[in-house]
Amino acid sequence: MNKVWLIIQREFLTRVRKKSFLIATVVVPLIFPAIIGGLIYIMMKEAESAKPDTVMVMDESGVINLDSSKNTKRFIFVPLQTSLEQAKKTYNETKDFALLYIPKFNISKPEGLMIYTQENPSIEKIGDLESILQDRVRDLKLQEFKIDKETLKNLKTSINLKQINLTKTGEEKSSNSGILYGLGFALGIMIYVFVLVYGIQIMQGVIDEKTSKVVEVIVSSVKPFQLMLGKIVGIAAVGVTQFAIWLILISFLSSGVLGYFGLKMPQKQAMEQMAKKVQDEDVKQAMNQPNSHIKELLGNLGEIPFAKIAFVFVFYFLGGYLLYGALFAAVGSAVESIQESQQFQFPITLPLLIGYFGLFMFILRDPHGSVSFWLSIIPFTSPVAMVGRIAFDVPTWQLLLSMALLIGGFILTTWIAGRIYRVGILMTGTKVNYRVLAKWFLMRE
């Protein structure tokens, strides 16, 4: 065990002392705030300098009446009193955004409306124009059916179902599916990316040592299995360290960038709203209302067991990393270049990919369904699936079963990978295929 610990130290210290590690650890957290700050700056400057687009309107219906009185921040309307062909010629002689043609139409089924542009417009601008036309047609329908706008407005009713989880003991806890969906989505994606990235790092590290002949010196002192285990755990420690630094720096720097532009992090905004509620009578009254969205949202956030979720995330990150890391190490020991490893990478990453797609197709849609259950229990898919489910209050027995099977899966893959690793790490110049891997696995010590 002492030899394994020495290998772990070697792998950890060798990587954290590299310039590439230091650069990636510092630069990556700087990139995200820089991107956020740059995009916000460009967005603000663009909003300041943006001018409304001019839209020529050829209205044969005579009822839409888009003129200067209907101008918005986005569009200036210029009505034309001419034929459509002449309107097209007039439009082509300008640099205006568009020519809107409105023929005579039946308000119950408006058809034939067209827009002519000199370049392909964005879907957002087309959507804004369609919304303006829809509002005008709706107003015409209200006039035809003699319906008052205020009456119609009062008919609209918003329903907000308050979600309550009722436990077996009768305890009630508030919940919010939207928050849980976002949490499961983010955590599942993070697990998928980290396990894949650091697993490939293990494979690359094994290939580098094999081709540099360093491994031949190391295995003279330790068993190949000990070398593999130490390498996997050592690189895992590097990954956890780097991730923790990223999390702290990105949060701190992003908050600073948003503060520079007069914006605030969402958490800080929520806290300030809570602090101001005593002074602001309107907000205080709204907070005391049973259907207050602010009160409900903050209450739902308070009910989420963040400590439990953080523990589960770290466990499945390490468990998934160790499970897949062993397989990547076995592949790295069998080949002599990344190009040779590609034929073996897909079968390894396929279960992880199934868990990734299952996150969207099953888990986030129905976290307690049978498919979601099995995806979160099977060790090869559970790192992504269970992390995606955990925010939805997974039964304790399912969580413990999944954890136990993941530990068992890691032990199994490590044993399988170790049998391949002990032979492959010393083999050079051999054309490797699945039959060769099976032969190495079955070879007696």
Image (spheres, rainbow, N blue to C red):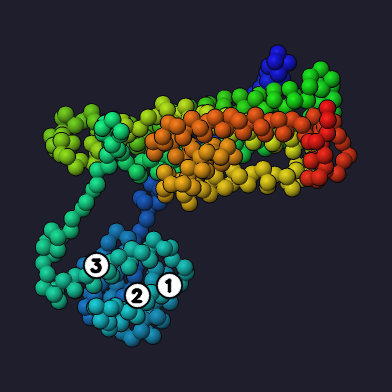
| Residue 368 visible from this viewpoint | yes
The spot of residue 173 in percent (x, y) is 28, 34
Q: Quadrant of residue 85?
A: bottom left
The spot of residue 394 in percent (x, y) is 42, 36
CA gap, disc 1 to disc 3? Answer: 22 Å
The spot of residue 16 in percent (x, y) is 65, 23
Q: Is residue 444 above or below residue 127?
A: above
Dot in front, 2 or 3 = 3
Q: Is residue 176 above or below residue 9?
A: below
Q: Quadrant of residue 404?
A: top right
Q: How many marks?
A: 3
Dot in front, 1 or 3 = 3
Asked if the residue at tag 3 contacts the one at tag 2, i.e. Cβ–Cβ closer than 8 Å, the answer is: no
Quickly name the residue at label 2.
100
Quickly name the residue at label 1.
117
Q: Residue at x 59, y 39 (%)?
A: 380
Q: Residue at x 69, y 25 (%)?
A: 229
Asked if the residue at tag 2 contacts the one at tag 1, i.e. Cβ–Cβ closer than 8 Å, the answer is: no
Q: Quadrant of residue 304?
A: top left
| Local crowd size for mark 3, using a 10 Å CA cut-off: few (<14), some (14–19), many (≥20) | few
Q: Nearer the viewer, residue 88 or 159?
A: 159
Instruction: Identify residue type, mark 2.
Output: Leu
In the image: residue 265, left or right of residue 138 = right
Q: Secondary structure at mark 3?
A: helix
Quickly name the residue at label 3.
135
Q: Nearer the viewer, residue 8 or 136?
A: 8
